[in-house]
Image (cartoon, rainbow, N blue to C red):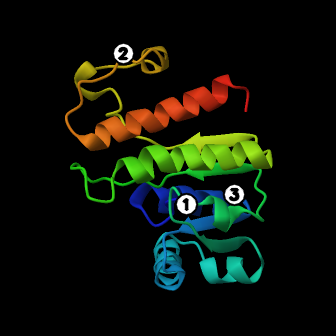
């Protein structure tokens, strides 16, 4: 998820350079995002169109947290989750919690149901709020916050979802 973002496009480009077969989850509508992502990959020296033609790159429309329907008939060996809402104020659609926390939880639930063994979350250094340097143990023990904004809080919740998923042996 999130291949059209700054970090996501670089991660996807590197995976493709290394020969990985990738499925890029893009927000709707699919077609403008697909074309934009192919242009971005081209600027990074990756010929996306030829990879699409060879079956090494495909695209799927994914709106977090409602990803389950779009992914229902898909199988992946791993998920690289780069998508995120970077808004710093809560919106009427409950962003950034909807995308960052609920979206991560929905992807983890899907991965558990479908037997996807690996989940990679690209997050932020700000998951600890004003806490300062933070170790995973502190994150799991709720020793975080206070937060400077709802973005930090939502990313902390997403990190906790991943830690719970891992602890559950998924």
Secondary structure at badge 1 equals loop
Q: Residue at x 32, y 19 (%)?
A: 133
**Tag 1 or tag 3, which sits nearer the N-term?**
3
- Would you call the spot at circle 2 few (<14 residues within 10 Å), some (14-19), or many (20 or more)? some
Q: Nearer the viewer, residue 140 or 106?
A: 106
Alpha carbon separation for disc pair 3 and 2: 38 Å
- Residue 50 quadrant: bottom right
Please state if 8 lies on the left or on the right of 13 as rendered: left
Question: Disc 3 vs disc 1: which is toward the camera?
Answer: 1
Secondary structure at badge 3 equals loop
Q: Where residue 19 appears, x then y in whole percent? A: 73, 61
Question: Disc 1 vs disc 2: which is toward the camera?
Answer: 1
> Can residue 116 be seen from the camera position used here?
no
Q: Nearer the viewer, residue 101 or 9?
A: 101
Residue 66 is marked as: 1
The vertical placement of 108 against 2, above or below, is: above
Q: Where residue 139 appears, x then y in whole percent? A: 43, 21
Residue identified by numbered label 3: 18
User: Label 2 near label 3: C-beta < 8 Å?
Assistant: no
Residue 143 is marked as: 2
Secondary structure at badge 2 equals loop
Please state if 51 lies on the left or on the right of 102 as rendered: right
Residue 16 is marked as: none
Q: Where residue 100 appears, x then y in whole percent? A: 43, 47
Q: Residue at x 28, y 24 (%)?
A: 145
Q: Residue at x 24, y 30 (%)?
A: 147
Q: Residue at x 62, y 72 (%)?
A: 60
Q: Quadrant of the N terminus?
A: bottom right
């Amino acid at each position: 998820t999130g291949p059209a973002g700054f970090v996501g496009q670089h991660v996807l480009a590197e995976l493709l350079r290394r020969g990985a077969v990738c499925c890029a989850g893009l927000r709707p509508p699919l077609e403008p995002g697909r074309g934009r992502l192919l242009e971005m990959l081209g600027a990074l020296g990756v010929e996306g169109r030829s990879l699409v033609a060879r079956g090494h790159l495909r695209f799927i429309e994914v709106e977090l947290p409602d990803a389950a329907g779009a992914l229902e008939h898909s199988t992946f060996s791993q998920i690289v989750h780069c998508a995120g809402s970077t808004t710093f104020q809560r919106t009427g659609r409950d962003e950034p919690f909807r995308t960052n926390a609920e979206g991560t939880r929905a992807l983890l639930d899907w991965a558990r149901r479908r037997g996807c063994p690996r989940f990679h979350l690209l997050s932020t250094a700000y998951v600890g709020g004003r806490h300062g340097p933070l170790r995973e143990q502190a994150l799991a023990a709720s020793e975080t916050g206070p937060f400077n904004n709802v973005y930090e809080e939502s990313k902390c919740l997403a990190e906790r979802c991943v830690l719970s998923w891992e602890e559950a042996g998924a």
